[in-house]
Image (spheres, grey):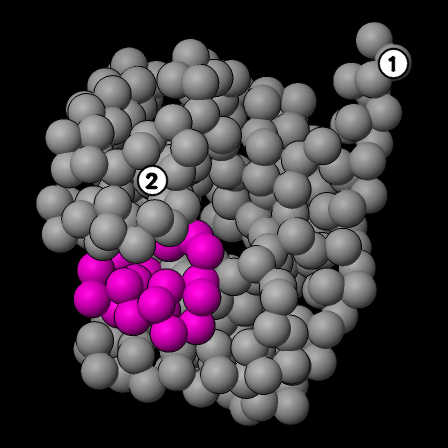
Amino acid sequence: MARIMGIINVTPDSFWSGSRVQDKTTLVERVRTMISQGADAIDVGGCSTRPNAVQASAEEEMKRLEWGLDSIRAEFPDILLSVDTYRPDIAERCVREWKVSIINDVYGGNDSMYKVVADTGAQYVLMWSEDIKDDPIGEMMLFFGNKLEKMKKAGVDVGSKVILDPGYGFGKTVEQNYTVLANQARLREFGLPVLSALSRKSMAWKLLKITPDDALPATIAMNTVALMNGADWIRVHDVAEAVHTVKIVQALTDNK
């Protein structure tokens, strides 16, 4: 059965205001709710990567993650944690100090990040965020093939440590996002788990001319398609609805 990653942003500017937390009490209660609803992991971000965001400095990102991860680990010592960062030094510190298990890197990594993955043994979400030229699926497959070779050369145990993320919302037009979603099953050719992060993203609200606040039904629809096209993980703001989606798709799969 597919697993669910709940989103927590200890930021003031992530694209959906409902994902932001600025104090310990709110953070702990939100994580507690996600766990009770069925989240398998919590993904904590300290630097917004939404379009046109002003990137937080490394110092500011680390400051946010420190209080966020401290707060979560004090209350939930055993929950599986992911850190949403593209900075290798921050990723390494989070893995070593707070026992973070997954590094979620929206920029696809580099040699320094791959060394951190190899040295720490953390799992790594390899996301495709390059701008598409003219062939979404071909370029996606080429990107992952090249990156996986680099990771192997860096000493990463790719077969057990890497999760592929097609990067919905990054470097793609609305139409290209749907082309990728429709063909997401191609990623199974790599023999690795796939994570789909579609929650309340612009490919829904731009198409439907709504706002992120109104995009939960669209998110459920997109996650259903992603699961039927091979997603092993879905990364979401709304855990309870995601649990229902996973169970229904699993029932369909079990009763074919």
Amino acid at the residue labelled 2: Leu
User: Mark 1 highlights which residue?
Assistant: 255
Count residues near mark 2 (Cα–Cα under 10 Å), then give few for <14, some for 14-19, many for 20+: many
Q: Is residue 192 left or right of residue 226?
A: left
Tell me if I can see residue 58 in this picture. Answer: yes
- Label 2 with label 1: CB-CB less than 8 Å: no
Q: Between residue 99 and residue 150, name the one nearer to us.
A: 99
**Residue range highlighted in magenta:** 85-103
Mark 2 or 1, nearer chain start: 2
Q: Between residue 13 and residue 64, name the one nearer to us.
A: 64
Q: Is residue 190 magenta?
A: no
Find residue 182 and report its horizontal and vertical position in percent: 52, 20
Tell me if I can see residue 104 in this picture. Answer: no
**Residue 127 image-quadrant placement:** top left
Find residue 224 and report its horizontal and vertical position in percent: 69, 32
Residue that sits furthest to the top in the current view: 256
Instruction: In the rendered view, tell whether residue 52 sits above or below residue 26.
Output: above
Find residue 124 and report its horizontal and vertical position in percent: 37, 45
Q: Is residue 234 left or right of residue 245?
A: left
Residue at 43% from the left image edge and 53% from the top image edge: 102
Find residue 123 and report its horizontal and vertical position in percent: 40, 46
Residue at 82% from the left image edge and 35% from the top image edge: 247
Secondary structure at badge 1 equals: loop
Instruction: In the rendered view, tell whether residue 20 sits above or below residue 7.
Output: below
The numbered disc on residue 170 is: none
Q: Quadrant of the N terminus?
A: top right
The numbered disc on residue 126 is: 2
Q: Quadrant of the C terminus?
A: top right
Q: Between residue 80 and residue 50, name the one nearer to us.
A: 80
Rounded to the nearest angstrom, the CA distance separating label 2 from label 1 is 32 Å
**Residue 239 image-quadrant placement:** bottom right
